[in-house]
Image: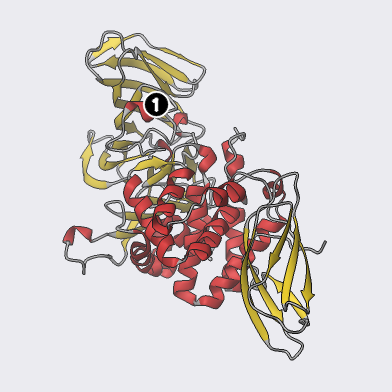
């Protein structure tokens, strides 16, 4: 997702230029949030009012449990009232307190259990309920990171993915959009209270923070369909924009790029992971939110026409990174936001050329070097318990730039081969940073543990101080590299531009070892002392280079 502030930063950039999986085959034992429980499916039925935020819910949770597990804990805020619980069709007496519904499973037999929860109440978060300037009521899910519990009883953690069905009853003049495939719309109710019932089904497992509905007077504007030239007609991907009727005439606008973006990312990563892709004008605390198959964008981006292609590329990249392959723990959020940041920049290169791409990466690098959070905390921040605080330059800019450096270091072929393997291996499941590392090690044939450790598990950036000397007798140039020994030295591939006194230039590449004090000899012979040496002249490294 992108916050409004990050969208503003992205618009500036564009002006300058953008352990094992737990999925369908996972085991109960792999889950860490609620050990012994693996939710397989949510069947969610929601009744929306004509006005206001009072909802009625009826959710059936189908789960597998390990032997000896006698309780299912569902996350649900205390402000909502549980009216009844059934376990495999039998009524039980739950305990609902401290944001948890404790469901006793003692009487259930077998490793599969069905738990039905009926509840109601006024929602204040998670489902954003607003009346717009035209007096129209709207309802939009906004779950990230763990706010599904504000309106849905779930195991509310990214490590436990499940399929989901939606049955939404709403005022008859409201359009409902949700995850997956539209199964049907029908009128319900009597002549005095005409309402509609809309059903959607996402048959692939997704995390609870991606499970959403949108309800409002939306119109559906179809976009170009991608993938239909492939041999498999099932690869046709329908895309559309759900928008308030007064903004329909603006479309497709920047969404004309939606189909080319998907096609390009498919060449880099692999097939689009879901059945459809909807882009929705919505209410969200974020500028853009990557809900699986239904990206929600901030309402005002349409009214002010500030929607950017870069934002569309960022949120579309999330369909692979974060949605299909999900970080198993929040500390690894860079696997979602870093990839989306870098792939949005790759789209800039595809659409606008190398100079625009270099300008975007330079802008990202400047942000990383200037950021106080980057200086004080690592990208993989296991100590951070305020998950919203993880929406920072570490997860976005530094994570994206680390991927850029990695791409530069191992080359396009190995990098994208490893990314495709990572996507294929963990598709519709979850992963951690070392899962990505292992796939890239396989594709490149190089150990990458030190690279991941120094750039992702250590605060800050490299800060080598480099001096040099020329030896007339041997014709060699030696570098003296001093690095901070408190936080640890970095191993860095360093490009050196040697400018001769004649003005001729020579570029050489060396590897600086991760030592507090190192001497590195440049390859080649230099018969006379050069006029100057420039270190990292293209400014590829996340480094502040000084002199001893």
Residue furthest to the front in view is: 473
Residue drawn at 49 percent across, 34 percent down: 146
Q: Position of residue 456 (x, y in %)?
A: 58, 47
Left or right side of 288 for 272: left
Snapshot quadrant of residue 510: bottom right
Compared with 178, 348 (above or below) is below
Left or right side of 179 for 157: right
Q: Position of residue 97 (x, y in %)?
A: 49, 15
Q: Position of residue 508 (x, y in %)?
A: 62, 75
**Nearest the eye: 294 or 314:** 314
Residue furthest to the right in view is: 548
**Nearest the eye: 124 or 461:** 461
**Residue that label 1 marks:** 153
Compared with 362, 472 (above or below) is below
Say if residue 452 shows up in the picture. Answer: yes
* The C terminus, quarter of image: bottom right
Look at the numbered disc 1 and give the secondary structure of its residue.
loop
Snapshot quadrant of residue 149: top left
Residue furthest to the bottom in view is: 502
Residue drawn at 28 percent across, 35 percent down: 193
Residue drawn at 76 percent across, 84 percent down: 528
Q: Position of residue 325 (x, y in %)?
A: 39, 46
Say if residue 15 shows up in the picture. Answer: no
Q: What kind of colouring is applied to the model shown?
A: secondary structure
Residue drawn at 46 percent across, 38 percent down: 143
- Circle 1 packing at 10 Å, graded few (<14), some (14-19), many (20+), is many
């Amino acid at each position: 997702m992108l916050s409004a502030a990050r969208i503003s930063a992205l618009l500036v950039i564009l002006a300058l230029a953008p352990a094992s999986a737990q999925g369908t085959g996972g085991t109960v034992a792999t889950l860490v949030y609620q050990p012994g429980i693996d939710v397989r499916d949510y069947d969610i039925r929601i009744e929306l009012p004509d006005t206001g935020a009072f909802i009625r819910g009826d959710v059936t949770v189908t789960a597998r449990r390990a032997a000896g597990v006698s309780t299912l804990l569902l996350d649900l805020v205390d402000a909502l009232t549980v009216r009844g619980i059934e376990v495999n069709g039998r009524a039980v007496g739950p305990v609902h307190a401290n944001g948890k519904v404790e469901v006793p499973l003692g009487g259930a037999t077998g490793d599969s259990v069905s738990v039905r929860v009926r509840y109601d109440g006024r929602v204040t978060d998670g489902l954003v309920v607003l009346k717009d300037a035209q007096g129209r009521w709207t309802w939009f899910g906004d779950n990230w990171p763990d706010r599904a519990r504000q309106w849905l009883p779930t195991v509310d953690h990214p490590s436990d993915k499940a399929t989901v069905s939606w049955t939404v009853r709403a005022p008859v003049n409201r359009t409902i959009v949700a995850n997956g495939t539209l199964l049907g719309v029908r009128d319900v109710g009597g002549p005095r209270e005409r309402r509609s019932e809309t059903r959607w089904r996402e048959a692939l497992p997704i995390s609870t923070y991606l499970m959403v509905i949108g309800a409002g007077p939306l119109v559906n504007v179809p976009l170009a369909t991608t993938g239909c030239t492939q041999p498999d007609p099932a690869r046709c991907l329908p895309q559309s924009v759900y928008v308030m009727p007064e903004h329909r005439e603006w479309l497709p606008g920047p969404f004309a790029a939606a189909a080319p973006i998907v096609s390009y990312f498919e060449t880099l990563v692999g097939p689009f992971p879901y059945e459809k892709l909807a882009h929705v004008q919505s209410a969200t605390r974020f500028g853009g939110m990557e809900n699986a198959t239904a990206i929600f964008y901030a309402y005002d981006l349409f009214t002010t026409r500030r929607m950017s292609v870069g934002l569309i590329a960022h949120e579309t990249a999330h369909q692979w990174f974060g949605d299909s392959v999900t970080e198993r723990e929040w500390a690894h959020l860079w696997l979602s936001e870093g990839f989306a940041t870098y792939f949005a920049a790759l789209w800039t290169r595809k659409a606008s050329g190398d100079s625009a791409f270099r300008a975007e990466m330079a802008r990202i690098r400047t942000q990383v070097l200037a950021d106080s959070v980057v200086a004080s905390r690592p990208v993989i921040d296991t100590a951070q318990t305020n998950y919203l605080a993880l929406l920072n330059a570490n997860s976005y800019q530094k994570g994206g730039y680390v991927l850029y450096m990695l791409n530069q270091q191992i080359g396009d072929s190995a990098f994208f081969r490893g990314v495709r393997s990572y996507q294929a291996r963990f598709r519709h499941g979850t992963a951690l940073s070392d899962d990505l590392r292992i796939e890239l090690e396989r594709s490149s044939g190089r150990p990458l543990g030190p690279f991941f450790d120094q750039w992702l598990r250590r605060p800050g950036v490299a800060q080598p101080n480099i001096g040099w000397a020329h030896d007339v007798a041997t014709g060699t140039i030696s570098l003296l590299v001093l690095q901070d020994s408190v936080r640890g030295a970095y191993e860095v591939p360093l490009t050196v531009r040697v400018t001769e006194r004649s003005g001729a230039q020579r570029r050489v590449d060396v590897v600086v070892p991760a030592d507090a004090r190192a001497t590195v000899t440049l390859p080649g012979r230099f018969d006379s002392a050069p006029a100057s040496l420039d270190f990292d002249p293209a400014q590829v490294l996340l480094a502040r280079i000084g002199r001893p």
